[in-house]
Every structure is written in C-alpha cells, then in structure tokens.
Amino acid sequence: MNPDFLYAIRTCPALDPAVRDDFPMTGIQSHGKPFAYLNNAATTLKPLPVLEAMDRYYREYGSPIHRGADRIAHKATTAFESVRRTVARFLGTPHPEAVVFTGGTTAGLNLVCLSYGELVVGAGDEVVVTPNEHHANYVPWQQLCRRKNAKLVLAPLDANGCLQPEALESVMTERTRIVACSHITNVMGAAMDLRALAAVVHRHGAVIVVDGAQGVVHERPDVVGWDIDFYAFSGHKLYGPTGVGVLYGRPALLEKMPPVVMGGEMIDIVDVYETSFREPPWRFEAGTLPVAEVIGLGAAIDYVLELGYCGMQKKVLGLTERAVRGLSGLENVHVYNPENAFSGVLSFNIRGVHPHDASSVYDREGIALRAGHHCSQPTMRWLGVGATLRASFAIYNDDSEVDRLIEASKKAGDFLDVLF
Ligand code: PLP
C-alpha cells in the first residue's frame, strides 16, 4: 500500500463513535456476552437508514416497478431508477445505463463470463486470473476456458498477495482476451492498483473484469478514472441488503453483449420465432428485480458517502493494526497478511489448533469470525494451508472487541491443553 495514501488516511478526521448506534445488531448478546461481530468480510450489519428505507417501501409504496400504470407504481419505479443514478455517481460514471442490477457479485461476474466471455474467448485464447481469487471470480473463468479450449493463466502475486503491474505484464500475450482480478482479495486483503493494472490490460487489447466485493467497502471505486471495463459488487458487504448487487459495464461493451437470462422486461418485440432485446442495462435484468433491496442499496450508498470513505478507512485501519499487533505478539499465532491492514481483513492460524476447533472457542466468547477456506481454495493452496481463521473489521467495531479477539486467541491456543 502506497505510504502517502496511508498517511492521508491517518490524518483524516475520526468517525464519530456513535456510528455504532446506527447498527441495531451491535446491541445483541451471544452466549450471554455482548456480540462482537468480526465477520464483516462475509457480510456486514445493516444501519437504520437502510432498514428504514426498505421498511418504507414495503409499508408505503410496495408496488411493481416498470409494471404498473398507477401513481404508486410510478413512485416505486422512480425510487428504483433513482438508485441507478446514485450507483452511477458512486462508481464515477456519468452513464446510469452502465449500471446493471444483479443478485450480487457472483451473479455479476457470471453474467460477464457467460455473455462477454462466451462472445470473445475462442480456442487457444487466454484468460488471466490470480491464484487469490474468490471462487466467484475463478470458477466461471476456469469453466469458460474448459468449454472453449482456451487457456487459464495464473498471474504471479507478490508475498502480500498483491498483483503488481509488472507481474501482470509478464503473463500478457496477444491471445489474452480477459484479465479477472479482485479490487481487494478476501483472504489476504491485498489491495490492487487497478488504474495501473487496467493500463497494462488495455495496452494488450484485453479487458479487465474486477471483483469489487471487498474493495468497494474500503476504497471508493472510480471506474472511469481507473479505466475499468467491468466492476461487480454486492450490496450486503457495503452495509446494504442481501440479494442485490451491481455490475458496472463499459457502455460500448454492454451494447455488444447478448442477454443470458431471458424473461419479462428484457425484451423489445417477441415474435413467433424471434425476439429482439432491449438496450442495456434492461437487457440484463430479466424478471422481477429485488426492488426493496435496490432501494436499501441506495440508502447504504448514501449512508457511506455521508460518513466519507476517509473516516471509514481510518477506523478500519486502526482496528486492524491493533489486531495485527496483538495477534502477532502471541507466540503460537501466525498472521498471514500483517502488511495489508488497510483492507480490514486478517487471516491467521493458531499452531496446533484447527481453525474450526478454534472458532468454537471464539463463539463461546461471543465473537463471530470465519474459519475455513473462505470460498477461495486457490488461496489456501497458494498459502500452503488447508484453512485459516479470518477476522474482519467494520466501522462499528471498537477497540474492546479487538482486545476480546486477542484474549480469545490466547484461550484458543490453550485448546489442545483443554482437550488432552
Ligand atoms: N468475491 C469476493 C472477493 C468475496 O469476498 C465474495 C464474498 O465473500 C464474493 C466475491 C461473492 O459475493 P456474493 O456472495 O455476495 O455474490
């Protein structure tokens, strides 16, 4: 991570600690202890403005969008489409029609693969991925390459799990059609310089597909400024609802792409043996969309923009650095990514204790974190382990929760002593 960038984060004003009160779930108990939710890379808790926006839709104007001629349905459609404009502004594009609503990151990445990938990748072509991708940004490309008799190429990563532009350059060829990588990875928390990577990709005439599931939470995307072709993210990791996500696509590319899912609202004319399709983004939004969730996503984006990314980054960085210091100080704990505190993800293991066993100790202490391969078996292979523990931090966490994580890690380290 660029030291100037980290300096800018450290010097920005701190978030008001009262932010925690915006999240009702921070007040619950688990096993009779205050619930410490440290599984934020899996999903985040939801603030009141998101809950209220969704509740208001269902109570006051819960009508179909694009499918009703009455005033209330018009209100629902207007609210829904205004979120498209909010998302476009958020992502840094002047084109709302470049924003496709999806079910989440997985759905968005699969859409790019099954539509654009099927279109441009042929036998002998190459698709570049990294060995630290989430399965959602790995398996679709792997399977596409198998179907097309194309080659899946793994770009080398540095010791922190970061894809450096020179390393990407070293695997690009005239057959490279697509490069798929994360904005921030979900196990190592490695943050990519997307602008530099996109420049490499475009020099070789390929397109860059970005998995923004983790990145969107910690760094505001700038799809036009960074020259990104596709960027997918999920609402639920950004303090928004589950079941909704976004795929940004460069308008000229979306124009060329065929639809993958067919049904209502994505068609123009359906003749007996032929159908013409609507323009993007509607061509990719068949069927009834999750209206309340889209409205909730709009509220989540308004919420984070109101707080400001700088304050959020400062908070998460401070918590993660505290956790790195505390855990690295424990004799039997190995932290895999101490250099990547910016992304709020900390992967570690306790020597001699399986992560699944350890996670039951944390649970007893009222702490939620994740144990396993984190939907990235390629990363586990890259690390040379079967599984890790993963603590991940968000804006409502506080120092006392980090300290409880460290104390519980000491206890989990004694797990073998308890057993035998
Ligand atoms: N990509 C990354 C990096 C993730 O962390 C996740 C979720 O954990 C996903 C993709 C999949 O997101 P979703 O399950 O919301 O589609």
Image: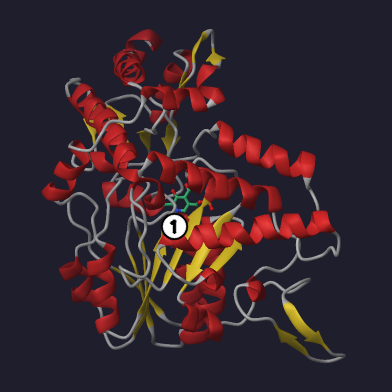
Where's residue 280, x and y in %?
60, 77
Observer-nearest of 53 and 42: 53
* Residue depicted at x 32% and y 62%: 130
Observer-nearest of 354 and 411: 411
Please tell me whether residue 229 is drawn above or below residue 181 in the rendered image: below
Quadrant in which the C terminus is drawn: top left
Q: Residue furthest left?
A: 3
Count of marks placed on residues: 1
Colouring method of the image:
secondary structure
Please tell me whether residue 239 is drawn above or below residue 416 in the rendered image: below
* Residue depicted at x 60% and y 73%: 281
Q: As drawn, is 193 to the left or to the right of 229?
A: left
Label 1 secondary element: helix
Looking at numbered disc 1 in the image, what kind of residue is underneath it?
Phe
Q: Local crowd at mark 1 within 10 Å, few (<14), some, or many (≥20)?
A: some
Q: Residue furthest front?
A: 71
Which residue is tagged 1?
A: 90
* Residue depicted at x 28% and y 64%: 194
Where's residue 3, x and y in %?
12, 47
Where's residue 329, x and y in %?
17, 21
Q: Answer with the quarter of the image where residue 165 lies.
A: bottom left
* Residue depicted at x 57% and y 48%: 297
Where's residue 30, x and y in %?
54, 15
Please tell me whether residue 274 is drawn above or below residue 89 in the rendered image: below
Q: Answer with the quarter of the image where residue 15 lies.
A: top left
Q: As drawn, is 326 to the left or to the right of 45?
A: left
Q: Is residue 37 visible?
A: no
Q: As drawn, is 283 to the left or to the right of 312?
A: right
